[in-house]
Amino acid sequence: MICILGGTFDPVHFGHLRPALEVQQALGVPVVHLLPCRTPPHRPAPRAGAAQRLELLQLAVADEPALEIDTRELQREGPSYMVDTLESIRAEQGETPLCLVLGADALLGLESWHRWQDIPALCHLVVMQRPGARASTPRALVDRLNSTHVTDSRALHERSAGCVIDIPVTQLSVSSTQIRDLLAAGKSPRYLLPDPVLERITQEKWYAD
Ligand code: ATP
């Protein structure tokens, strides 16, 4: 089974890393692939460039074999549509079960994504509860996605796509926005993200206004 966690990672923080590791363990997969987008279609352009965000991700996962980086969106021109990414993985992996891991906030916006109706046929949706979000995905949304809500992760291994599962993760109320705001205000975001990531940001004065 392949698991990907897409995001802007502007910059990566413990609210990405710890839940990703918990999902990896909960689903019993060897690796979760962190998949940075190049040009997010639904939000303003990232503050840091693709190469910078990738470098920070590499520092963040350098000593964690259960977290890898998938750079396919960074190599693709134009908006980073998740449906294109899922199709490219599907073309490589055939019928292997494929999981898109996302925070509950991201799931609630899924119906605004490019060709969102095609997504449930391409992957399972693995939803990480985020602080402030409800504990389980609304039933009406699961129905609109034409998906099946499951509670046992073994079900994900039995089909290649089309399930939604909620995975409880440690609630870390950290966001990239918070970190960018702290840095822009000249304050320290230490202990919200890995030290090597912060060291690099500080060294290069990234995110300092
Ligand atoms: P920003 O503040 O710039 O919007 P972000 O902190 O939400 O960024 P993203 O890179 O946009 O980070 O998030 C990538 C994915 O990780 C999304 O699916 C998001 O819901 C999830 N995520 C981000 N932060 C957390 C967190 N603290 N806990 C659980 N999931 C998170």
Image (spheres, rainbow, N blue to C red):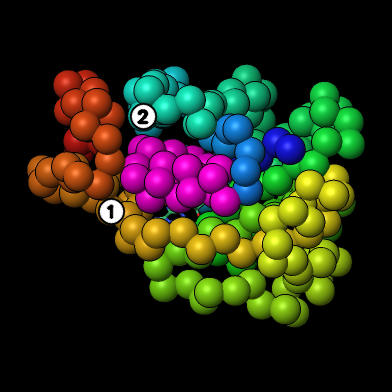
Give the residue displayed 62% in from the left and 20% down from the top: 75
21 is within the stretch colored magenta: yes
Query: Is any atom of residue 205 visible in this view?
Result: no
* Alpha carbons under labels 1 and 2: distance apart: 18 Å
Which stretch is magenta? 7-26
Q: Quadrant of residue 162?
A: bottom right
Decide if residue 89 is on the left or right side of residue 193. Answer: right
Q: Mark 1 points at which residue?
A: 178
Q: What element carries label 1?
A: helix
Q: Mark 2 points at which residue?
A: 60
Mark toward the viewer: 1 or 2: 2
Decide if residue 142 is on the left or right side of residue 134. Answer: right
Give the residue displayed 38% in from the left and 38% down from the top: 12
142 is within the stretch colored magenta: no
Q: Quadrant of residue 46?
A: top left
Is ligand 1 less than 8 Å from the beta carbon at label 1?
yes
In the picture, the quarter occupied by the N terminus is top right
